[in-house]
Amino acid sequence: MKQILQNLKDGSTEIAEVPCPRLAPGHLLLRTTRTLISAGTERMLVDFGKANPLEKARQQPDKVRQVLEKVKTDGLAPTLAAVRNKLEQPLPLGYCQVGVVAAVGGGRQTAAASEPTSSAPLSPDPSPARGEGSKAVAPLLMVGFNRRFAPQVVKIKELLAGVTGPKALVMTVNAGAIPADHWTQDPAVGGGRIIGEACHFIDLLRFLAGVRIVRAEALALDAATRDSVSISLGFADGSLGTILYLANGSKAFPKERLEVFAAGRVLQLDNFRKLTGFGWPGFKKLNLWRQDKGQQACAAAFVQALRARVAGEAVAPPIPLEEILEVSRVTIEVAAVVAALRQ
């Protein structure tokens, strides 16, 4: 099989022939039909690889602190060797995939190949006839809205369960600049950054609000790309959501920050590493050693649902179909509003 590999030491990218992955218990084998490089996280990794050592250090201050701590415990020479080894390890790219499940780990491979997966909204066609609100039995359809599966987001959802009244959700995304002539900016080719990336944050706020989105509005900075936008969401219970998706910031600033204001309390999630509670009884913080945006938990939830379906069990999909369709529709509508601002 072919795999796109990124060298973090010198920034080079290559397409290499690698062995087909071994199917392990609890995993699934996906026969990929389309794959894309993320214009956000993975593009930043490409830029990181091309940067000189000083720029690399400026972009990842947390990693610098970890290196300094390792120097204290292991010494300078072993630490330098470990850093060089880490940078020389090729990093596979292409997290955005569409394909068909070919096999499910644990020997349960039948009846799985027909379940589709995706990691972006389902279609650029906003027609309501696509099934939203349908009473028919929902297929096991999965979209890779992984952030709702992140451990710190799960904790936020747990804390919000005891809160009554509307909430204010603020998501700031320091997405980074992409040239106007880049393929991701072409609506006919890459779909644009709203459909390709901002959909994840619309889904995240929808998950935390726990109720339908009843209103969506958008404004964009006056620039050629129109990819620095403010998205305002209104929810059925009176909650408000704001997404600042910005392409004009500094790489030294954290990429993603979520803030939740509710019942005289605040939760702040910094780059999916540090979760801090302010005025929250019984909760102060939940920090992780490494960033976790929920990708593995998202895939694991889908595999578990597939295995249950194969076993003949009635199981709810990891993300309710009506929420997938709702978020997809809202994302496409927001993208259309932003596109109209260019005219």
Image: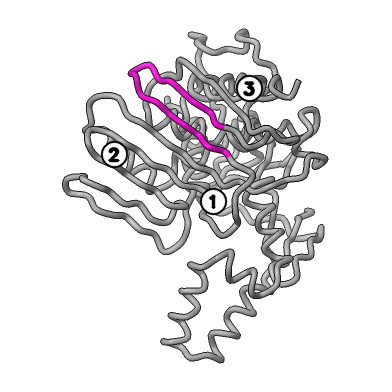
Residue named by callout 1: 255
x 42%, y 25%: residue: 314
First of labels 2, 1 by sequence position? 2
The kind of residue on which mark 1 rests is Lys
The kind of residue on which mark 2 rests is Glu
Residue named by callout 3: 332
* Residue 180 highlighted magenta (yes or no): no
Residue named by callout 2: 158
The image quarter containing residue 11 is bottom right
The magenta stretch is: 230-245
Looking at the picture, does residue 28 appear above or below residue 79? above
First of labels 2, 3 by sequence position? 2
Q: Residue 158: x percent and y percent?
A: 29, 39
Count of marks placed on residues: 3
In this orientation, which residue lies closer to the viewer: 196 or 57?
57
Looking at the picture, does residue 304 appear above or below residue 1? above
Q: What secondary structure is the magenta-colored segment mainly?
A: strand
Q: Residue 141: x percent and y percent?
A: 56, 27
* Residue 242 highlighted magenta (yes or no): yes
